Amino acid sequence: MSPMNNRLDEILQRVVTDPDPAARVPGVVATVTRADGTVYEGAAGVRSEASDAPMTTDSVFCMFSTTKAVTGTAVLQCVQEGLLDLDAPASEYVPEIAELQVIEGWADDGSQILRAPASPITTRMLMLHTAGLGYMFFSDVYSRILADTGQPDIIGATKASLMTPLLFDPGTQWNYGTNMDWAGLVVESIRGQRLGDVMAERIFAPLGMTDTAFTMTPSMTAQLTDVHQRSADDGSLTPTGMVLPQNPDIQMGGHGLYSTMPDYTKFLRMWLRDGEGEHGRVLNPETVAAAAVNGLGDLKVGMLKTSAPSLSHDAEFFPGLSKSWAYSFMVNDEQAPTGRSAGSLAWAGLGNLYYWIDREADVAGIWGTQILPFADPGSVGGYLDFETAVYDDLD
């Protein structure tokens, strides 16, 4: 596949040297894998605009929401061991979740109008993002709550940051939010361990993922890629120095992991291999088969409308295509313009990380950058060209 590798190298070089500052990214690492092993690893650019340290394939990234699928895997392990009933109230495992009420608006005095939910939240709803939870940067309601009340933001990784009202009755709509942070707490309750310890023992070890953790080792810190902020005015990039809490109250199952692209590729490859890792089995084949399909029924995944333009643009993958949700991935119900097969799995991370898993075509890949806001045109455009080039070669 060397002609493909040359083409992919060219795409990475293009995005880090683009003469248009609004289209250029500081650095990128990308990989492609098939079930029998990695077929491409590439890196280009620098880890930070503040230094000349080159981006390398072992550079460490804040993984943001690519964390969710790993947490989902830890949940599925509990299910296949008979330790978790996905349809039982999640409050059986994490009692505090029963305290969450549905917000219906605000009274004249500015207080929240709250009511009890019509039904309890289940772990299945958390896995499918139908529990009623949201994110401040994709919800005007949550943005107002943070502004009005001083409700702590999830970046602080505290239990208080998760005690937000529900936007609708559980199970009635799809809405992207803090669901997987709660799902991680379900896992902790069942296992009697911190989420990172569960992942290290049951996911990272059998996959050979040695550079993935909520708390970075010194060697990981030395390889850390800077998160950059894109200026809305001129497209310039400013290093932020942002690092998620390294000894957090809660290891956030929705966004808290740090990793490298080759490490995360081992996780993607496990889904191509029906749950088998390099050093042991992570999930049973029947668990993978049940998890890798639409679980939403007739509900659909739609536009993520920004309420914080510094953190995200409006974001939608393949506008006009039907999209649903699995445990815990987006599913494109139709073939994507890139060539991705219908029924493939995918998602992303806030810092403009994008991955896909195409079990039908036996190919998966990840594109890693560290730029805010999410859905950065320069990074998204490079990623879509990257994925398309992979499928052009497969054809």
Image (cartoon, rainbow, N blue to C red):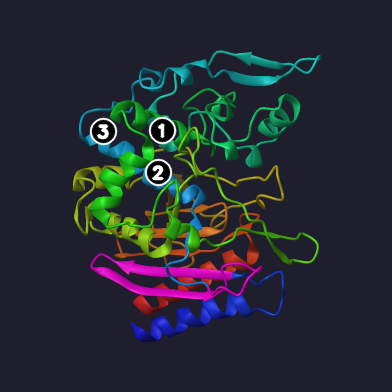
Q: Is residue 13 above or below residue 60?
A: below
**Residue under the point 46% across and 78% down:** 8
Q: Is residue 188 above or below residue 327?
A: above
**Residue under the point 65% across and 78% down:** 18
Q: Quadrant of residue 344?
A: bottom left
Classified by dominant secondary structure, the portion drawn in magenta counts as strand
Callout 1: few (<14), some (14-19), or many (20+) C-alpha neighbours within 10 Å? many
Residue under pointer 2: 328
**Residue under the point 54% across and 29% down:** 162
Nearest the camera: 155 or 241? 241
Q: Position of residue 332 (x, y in %)?
A: 44, 53
Callout 2: few (<14), some (14-19), or many (20+) C-alpha neighbours within 10 Å? many
Disc 1 vs disc 2: Cβ atoms closer than 8 Å?
A: yes
Q: Which mark is residue 46?
A: none
The amino acid at mark 3 is Val
Nearest the camera: 140 or 46? 46
Q: Is residue 6 above or below residue 257?
A: below
Q: Which mark is residue 183?
A: 1
Q: Is residue 241 left or right of residue 347?
A: right
Bounds of the magenta span? Answer: 27-54
Q: Is residue 248 left or right of residue 340?
A: right
The amino acid at mark 1 is Ala
Q: Position of residue 22 (x, y in %)?
A: 71, 69
The amino acid at mark 2 is Ser
User: Is residue 395 among the parts visible in the rendering?
Assistant: no
Nearest the camera: 40 or 287? 40
Nearer-N-terminus badge (1/3) = 3
**Residue under the point 56% across and 73% down:** 53
Nearest the camera: 282 or 194? 194
Secondary element under disc 1, as helix, strand or loop, is helix
User: Is residue 28 among the parts visible in the rendering?
Assistant: yes
Residue under pointer 3: 79
